[in-house]
Amino acid sequence: MVTLADLSQRGQWTEAEVNAAAAKAAAMSNNDSDKALQTFIGETKRAMHPSVRSHVPALVSLRDLVWNAETEHKKADKNAPTPCRKAFARAYHMLIQMFGETQSGRILSTHADVLAWAEEHDPDLDLDKVLKRLQGIRDQLTRFYTDWPVDDIQVCIDALNEVDKKTLRNARAGNVVEIPAKNITKTDTAPEEEPAHDVAAGASDILDDVLGLGAAA
């Protein structure tokens, strides 16, 4: 990537020349599938892009600095946070994404810049993934409710059905989002003949188990 970026910079390659060079680099690579080749071509184009090529050496050095520092921190303390490794499977993947940020106009130039950027890419904060996790919880509760039709469980299911990306985004930003009461239904049931059993408390225990809160407590 550094060599290609340097060639592009010294030759001030046009888009057509960048495309030709990417194709030639792909022909010399060890990738043996069409998908892998297409991915590699796209990555080389990023490195040779006019907005990126002059920054590539500095980005590689910065990537090495941050990644190696994280490695040393992990050696010293196995519980040390590793935002870069959490966000990116490999150092190479992180570098390619750094090229992409530069191409879009955001140039990462310091250790702090990279750490903040990596935290933004924390997979735990990916709205699509978070929503998928939440839907999994809802589906699990739905299956549970089929066998154990507790009113409070149905209320939770109805509430979860109202949560979308906007709701999650606002919650993350600290904005309280209230789900309209009219969208939550609760089935009327006859009073329990055995009042000694606390349904609400039972439902809370069930939710704790599903969400893993019992273990955390």
Image: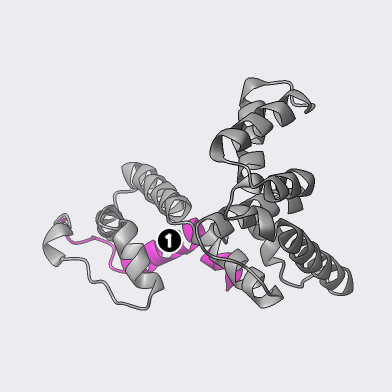
Q: Is residue 183 left or right of residue 116?
A: left
Q: Is residue 205 magenta?
A: yes
Q: Position of residue 7 (x, y in %)?
A: 74, 45
- Which residue matches tag 1? 207
Q: Pick whichever, 140 or 177, lies toward us.
A: 177
Q: Quadrant of residue 69?
A: bottom right
Question: Which quadrant: the C terminus?
Answer: bottom right
Query: For the point 31% across and 77% down, which residue is it?
Result: 175
Q: Quadrant of residue 13?
A: top right
Residue at the front extreme of this rendering: 11
Which residue is painted at 74% across and 64% down in the image?
Answer: 58
Horizontally, is 217 left or right of 44 in the view? Answer: left
Near-viewer residue (27 or 62): 27
Quadrant hosting residue 26: top right
Can residue 61 be seen here? yes
Is residue 129 rendered to the left or right of residue 109? Answer: left
Front residue of 198 and 11 = 11
Residue 214 part of the magenta segment: yes
Specify the quadrant that holds the N terminus.
top right
- Which region shows up in magenta? 189-217
The spot of residue 174 in percent (x, y) is 37, 78
Indicate whether 189 appears above or below 14.
below
Q: Position of residue 80 (x, y in %)?
A: 76, 73
Residue 149's place in the image compared with 57, above or below, is above
- 54 relative to 112, above or below: above
Amino acid carrying label 1: it is Leu
